[in-house]
Image: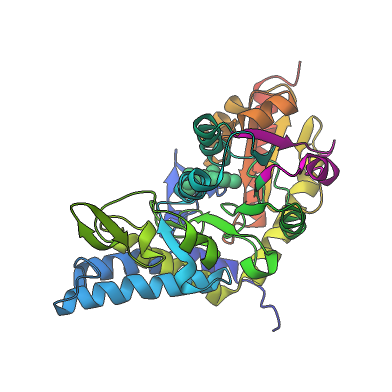
Amino acid sequence: MTRKALDVERIRNDFPILNRQVHGQPLVYLDNAASSQKPAAVVAAVSGYFLNSHANVHRGAHLLSVEATDAYESARAVVADFIGGRTRELVFTRGTTESINLVANSWGGANLAEGDEILLTLMEHHSNLVPWQLLAARTGAKLKFAGLTADGRLDLDDLTAKLGSRTRIVALTHVSNTLGVVNPVAEVARLAHEAGAICLVDGAQSAPHLEVDVVEIGCDFYAFSGHKMCGPTGIGALWGRKELLEAMPPWQGGGEMISEVRLDGSTWAAVPHKFEAGTPSVGDAVGLGAAVRYLSNLGLESIHAHEIELTEYALDRLTELDGFDLFGPRTDRVGVISFRYGDIHAHDLATILDARGVAIRAGHHCNQPLMHHLGVDATARASVYLYNTHAEIDALVDGLLAAKTLFGGFA
Ligand code: PMP
């Protein structure tokens, strides 16, 4: 298939929020790694669902319930297909965080014993660290961490050295939300399997930006969030290998997840419903389905190519600035650009940029252990998506220069 160049100006018209002003300036939205903006098609799908078809799902004695169930289940099929998975292997959750908690509680609770090891990396988001800490505290399992190379890549030699006969799971991020680096997750999944462990991939920063195929990656679980990929907040998914999902116990009990309930015990619905207790967030699932259709129509390859080109432009311009210091490698990355600029604190940079309409993020990015490793308490982070333009990168550069002037240069 030939790759189509993105028509960014047309795409921008799909996102009404991009036309608004902040502090009297045109919005330049460069905080996409935290959450993306939403195209009108997604908002229309959600409102269309609520205005026309809403009822509770899977209880279909009437037409609206049948329509709601169809809308929910067809969103599941579209979302599963988007990442190369089968529909019945896709569990809707509130997002990456809940997906990882599901695995830690259900798979982890059933499979980990004292002395077993959970191998993570130093660049994990708190969402792929704290659930494992809680599990370790409960089971007596130990956490180990693969280190990083000097330029901010995963140190595969260190990861291999830390994989041992007690390693039960390797859980790592596909793309670092601070360093922007793309990890060799297929290689890690292979190494994990060779060592007799399973592999969970945190796809929060990859599903929105890369063509993902969970079968090609060869992982056992893949977790992601709708709100970073043009979908609503409060919805995401866990893809898992069928054999694993089927063997795992439920993690939350209630309606929807049962087959039969008696006073002396219950049996469970088939996967994926076994993991979806209670009335699901149907409207959000419909919105995520619409987001996936929107991204797929444009083509992930085209979106990725646009972001890479824009990131190259940004890095060319930014690294020309005196005092600009990039965290993470220059290659094998996506458009998440973490940096320090002279001795101006990241929060000051973000505030000065905000006054000029430029939204970036400043802080630890839910990566406190990584911040300690990098020897900083915070970084500034600009992150691009399909609707960002070269002019917006220029606005970022101009804003940084203005910050330097405002501070009277660097100390
Ligand atoms: N992992 C990574 C790499 C992330 O960037 C994020 C979101 N910042 C998460 C997990 C958590 O995602 P959510 O808050 O949507 O559950």
Please tell me which residue lies in front, 281 or 241: 241
Name the residue at 25% across, 70% down: 58
Give the quarter of the image for residue 304.
bottom right
Name the residue at 81% across, 52% down: 331
Locate residue 129 relative to residue 325 in the image: left or right: left
Tell me residue 400's x, y (percent). Answer: 67, 34
Q: Is residue 148 magenta?
A: yes
Name the residue at 67% across, 28% down: 371
Residue 301 seen by the camera: yes
Q: Is residue 45 magenta?
A: no
Tell me residue 1's x, y (percent). Answer: 69, 84
Please tell me which residue lies in front, 306 or 142: 142
Tell me residue 229's x, y (percent). Answer: 51, 59
Vertical order, 102 against 327 (above or below)? below
- Identify the magenta region: 141-167
Please tell me which residue lies in front, 289 or 330: 289
